[in-house]
Amino acid sequence: MIGTTLSHYRITAAIGAGGMGEVYRATDTKLGRDVALKVLPTEMASSPERLERFQREAKALAALDHPGIVGVYSVEESGGVHFLTMQLVEGQSLDKLIPESGLPVEQILEIATALAEALVTAHEKGIVHRDLKPANVMVTKDGRVKVLDFGLARMSEAHVEVPGASEQPTELLTQEGIVMGTVPYMSPEQILGRAMDHRTDIFSLGIILYEVATGARPFQGDTSAELAAAILRDTPRPPRDLRSALPSGLAQVIDRCLQKEAADRFPSAREVREALVDAETPTVPGFGGRPVLAVLPFENRSGDPEQEYFADGLAEDLITRLSLWRAFPVIARNSSFSYKGKNVDLKEVSAGLGVRYVVEGSVRKAGSRVRIVAQLVDTVTGQNVWAQTYDRELTDVFAVQDEISEEIAASLVVDLQHAEHEQVQHRTPESLEAWGLYQRALGFFYRFTRENFEEGQALLERATELEPQFSTAWARLAEVRIWQVLHGWTESPDETIELALTHARRAVDLDPRNPEAHAELAFALMTAGDANAAIEESRRGMELNPSQPMALLFHAYFWHMTGHPPEDSIELVHRAMKLSPRDPTEWLFHDVLAGAYFNAGRFDEGLYASRRLIALWPEYYFGQLWCAMNAIGLGKLEVAQAAIREARELVPEVSLEMVRRVLGAMGPDVDRRMMGALQQAGLQ
């Protein structure tokens, strides 16, 4: 068919054969883009069963909207030829990338996680792939994973009745279309022709993971019959027998996926995904192999619930001080504090946060004295690297925090330099009461409602009255003012942003080494329209504290919004997410990612980030706006228009002018792209 034209698609090359059709590269002459065409051969189109299955594939694909799944654009017929148009994915199939000894562990985990996430989306829509194999997994040039060919997919019995599904003949591939799939990657129930559900894909995923981890398939046979018998009968060799360096957690995931009985496997792809996260090694990818540290909330042993904030404040300040040491990354407070009040095993913490070292401790406050017990544990060996008890007058508490952070850092980094010691010194409040008010205020800001922000603001204002030199409190007060402007929680937005600038500049003047002060000043400057100054301030915040997720996030946003390379921003956001993998304000990461992906032209990932943002915070209208922009990029006008309608339901007064004001300073090209997309979607 090369050189021929179907409708307005000019076929330029053959790509290969997929389930139920030949696949070609073609040019859409109307839109001027290359697409993939899956063409159903004429002799197959004459079969009602095959034609119905082809149309079912199109419906299955159209129902899926995930960056890890190839997207379908349309189902068409031209001159009696039935075909569907799909996203063209360029790269290599996974079966061509697996070396004899298996892929690197970090790459295995990335691929496995991407596949599990794609299956989560498919399974939650009732779609089972039924032909998952390395040849149906593409790895693009920039390392992204795409699942291809849902040609054998069908709606699961939980969503659609399939008459006779449990009564299929057991002859393996002897009757075309009866027992479907590719033998080496089939589940036992698939081979036996029994009823299948999403767990058949989990078995196939286990075979893929075994192969990418070891370079060999778990089941062997010279013929289809021998291979089928091995899948039904044999227990695979443990993958660590073939490759001892594999993380034990990954080997356990593979083993559970490959259980013969579906009931013994993971009950869902979502649980596979969670297990893969837990299987990650204690060194977080993206930090050059350096060990990562987490500080858990300190236990309050004072017997007074009102002193809980005191224990929390000690842990939080310790996180801040330790994160300023450049020798190792420190997990953010939001993620560390997700374990507050839980009796957890440190190995679980290590897996959940991706850390090597954990600091834990307790605080007992009585009268004017405080006892602080802290220890640093290596979660790999289970040994205490360092432990110490401090008995101090309350007036010395900030000096104790500095002492603890320096001793922990010294235990990890032998050759501490004097310059680093100077770097971590920053001003602390003299008033314990002001410090306590600040700690209490923090809890309100993670709830993101107008009422909670007003309560937090009142506490911060009292703290700054008691301690006018409290730099971080002024910085937080600036952030409160900015969010009031962005969410329309103020009657005087111009006056409020001026207050934010005043508060942030005061925070910087009081402590020029405070990274949070620089980050908040950058936020205020961007909102006020001074892009260049915002970028410089956010860069300064990153330099002062490379482990501060918000500093990274602010810089990522300012960078791509002012016309700089969005790929840089995407990398910064992913780094921030690794520093805070269990963040209760996770929506902020997706808020920045949705825009960065849009500016990068990676609209499928942008749409996914937008929908993740909407799921995390349904009341935030900008999730719908990002959704509309990325949908326009994908040519999905109806999706974009629906998103604008939903944004109007949340904020009736939303308009292009309002969006420009909220986004702040934008580069000319960014403004043109974003406003143009929103206008196409129906926003005026």
Image (spheres, rainbow, N blue to C red):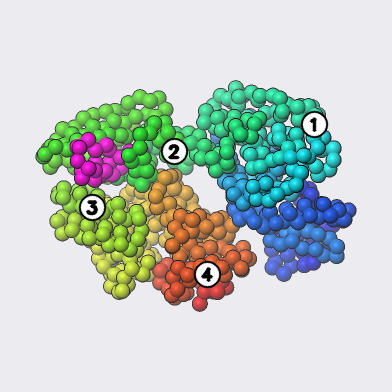
Please, what secondary structure does the residue beneath circle 2 have?
Answer: helix
Q: At which x and y percent is residue 186? A: 71, 36
| Residue position marked by numbered label 1 in the rendering | 224
Q: Which residues are magenta?
A: 294-319
Q: Is residue 249 magenta?
A: no
Mark earlier in primary sequence (4, 3): 3
Task: Give the alpha-carbon distance from disc 2 to disc 4, as whole Å.
Answer: 37 Å
Q: CA distance from mark 4 to mark 1?
A: 53 Å
The answer to the question of whether label 4 and label 1 lie on touching residues, with beta carbons closer than 8 A, is no
Mark 2: amino acid: Gly
Residue 32 in which image quadrant: bottom right
Q: CA distance from mark 2 to mark 3?
A: 28 Å
Q: Tell me which residue sits at (47%, 74%) in the image.
A: 656
Answer left or right for 219 relative to 683. right
Q: Is residue 251 visible?
A: yes
Sequence-wise, the earlier of marks 3 and 1 is 1
Mark 2 and 1 residues: CB-CB less than 8 Å, in contact? no
Per the image, label 1 sits on a secondary structure element best described as helix
Residue occupying the point 74% across, 40% down: 166
The residue that disc 4 covers is 644
Instruction: Please rate how many residues cluster around mark 3, counting C-alpha atoms within 10 Å: few if below 14, some from 14 to 19, many from 20.
Output: many
